[in-house]
């Protein structure tokens, strides 16, 4: 099957497995990236019901998906699995190679804030710290910069400079992943915000503005469930190379935390996932009180 509503940047192929009576056994979703910079890439999500595993269902779904990627002339297929899970073992046994490790971390918001002395190799649990510390970070802005924020789609007067700031993610550490480069334009920025709104979620963006010319030097994005409950999810955080070294990433993220805490009293926490090779962003998260919860591996099959 094919995705009935492809986006401007990707489309999906879908395979469903069932037994002779039509009972579902598993599924495979293959996302085909279409835009320049990533049109060599496919991303696989494969699931088999636990009771149906070790019967060849997953292998058959994988074979169909890989054949689909080859027909679409893709260079590689990416897939992600939690460390130590059946999916981890399945991919490792089928010519996929491990190319990236992601650490997931959570900041508990009930009494959450910035702890400047937070250790960088904390145990995998949550943390409660002094709430006044977030304001300590936001009260001391780096010279020459100011913060601005908005909800949903970027304001028209900032659309061009915000789009230009997205290149801050171009050199994000991805280890051995053949991920390519995401090429942004204003249309894509607006489409991404619309997709989040269409899911019923809220997108909040905080940016650092260079006061010398009004351009955006860096950004951080947070997506919150529509009902304001559960956990919010950090999306991208980036600072342009020419503006690094001023603490902008931590400053912006601290402001996002402060806003989330004030605006969503029922929000339980904030989630972030960071490549292990991205030592700078991991240090930022550690200093803000985020604590690791689990790790996943990115696998790649070269075609």
Image (spheres, grey):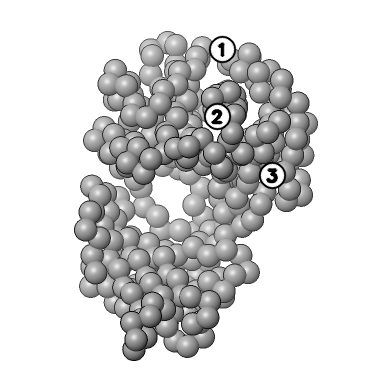
Image disc number at residue 201: none
Mark 2 residue element: loop
Q: Secondary structure at mark 3?
A: strand
Q: Quadrant of residue 24?
A: bottom left
Q: Residue at x 30, y 50 (%)?
A: 37
At horizontal 56% and vertical 12% (from top left) the residue drawn is 143
**Local crowd at mark 3 within 10 Å, few (<14), some, or many (≥20)?**
many
Q: Position of residue 142 (x, y in %)?
A: 58, 16
Specify the quadrant of the image occupied by residue 12: bottom left
> x, y percentage for residue 164?
34, 30
- Are discs 3 and 2 less than 8 Å apart at CB? no
Residue that badge 3 annotates: 291
- In the foreground, 37 or 138: 138
**Distance between the Cα atoms at labels 2 and 1?**
30 Å
Nearest the eye: 27 or 134 = 27
Secondary structure of residue under mark 1? loop
Residue 40 is left or right of residue 107, and the answer is left
Question: Which residue does the image show at 61% across and 18% down from the upper left?
Answer: 138
Identify the disc placed on residue 264.
2
Task: Say which residue label 1 marks.
Answer: 143
């Amino acid at each position: 099957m094919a995705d009935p509503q492809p986006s401007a940047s990707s489309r999906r192929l879908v395979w469903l497995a069932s037994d002779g009576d039509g009972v579902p056994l598993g599924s495979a979703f293959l996302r085909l990236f279409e835009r320049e910079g990533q049109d060599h890439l496919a991303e696989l999500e494969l699931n088999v019901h636990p009771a149906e595993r070790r019967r060849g269902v997953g292998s058959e779904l994988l074979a169909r998906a890989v054949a689909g990627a080859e027909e679409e002339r893709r260079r590689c297929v990416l897939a992600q699995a939690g460390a130590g899970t059946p999916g981890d073992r399945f991919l490792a046994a089928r010519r996929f190679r491990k190319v990236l490790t992601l650490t997931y971390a959570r900041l508990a918001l009930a009494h959450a804030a910035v702890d400047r002395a937070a250790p960088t190799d904390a145990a995998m649990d949550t943390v409660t710290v002094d709430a006044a510390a977030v304001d300590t970070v936001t009260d001391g802005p780096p010279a020459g910069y100011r913060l601005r924020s908005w909800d949903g789609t970027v304001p028209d007067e900032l659309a061009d400079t915000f789009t230009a700031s997205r290149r801050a993610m171009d050199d994000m550490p991805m280890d051995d992943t053949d991920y390519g480069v995401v090429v942004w334009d204003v249309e894509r920025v607006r489409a991404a915000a619309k997709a989040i709104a269409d899911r019923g979620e809220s997108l909040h963006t905080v940016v650092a503005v260079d006061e010398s010319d009004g351009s955006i030097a860096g950004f951080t994005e947070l997506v919150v469930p529509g009902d304001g409950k559960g956990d919010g999810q950090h999306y991208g955080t980036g600072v342009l190379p020419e503006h690094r070294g001023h603490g902008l990433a931590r400053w912006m993220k601290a402001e996002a935390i402060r806003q989330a805490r004030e605006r969503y009293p029922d929000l339980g926490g904030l989630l972030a996932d960071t490549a292990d090779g991205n030592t700078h962003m991991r240090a930022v998260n550690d200093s803000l009180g985020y604590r690791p919860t689990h790790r996943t591996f990115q696998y790649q099959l070269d075609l």
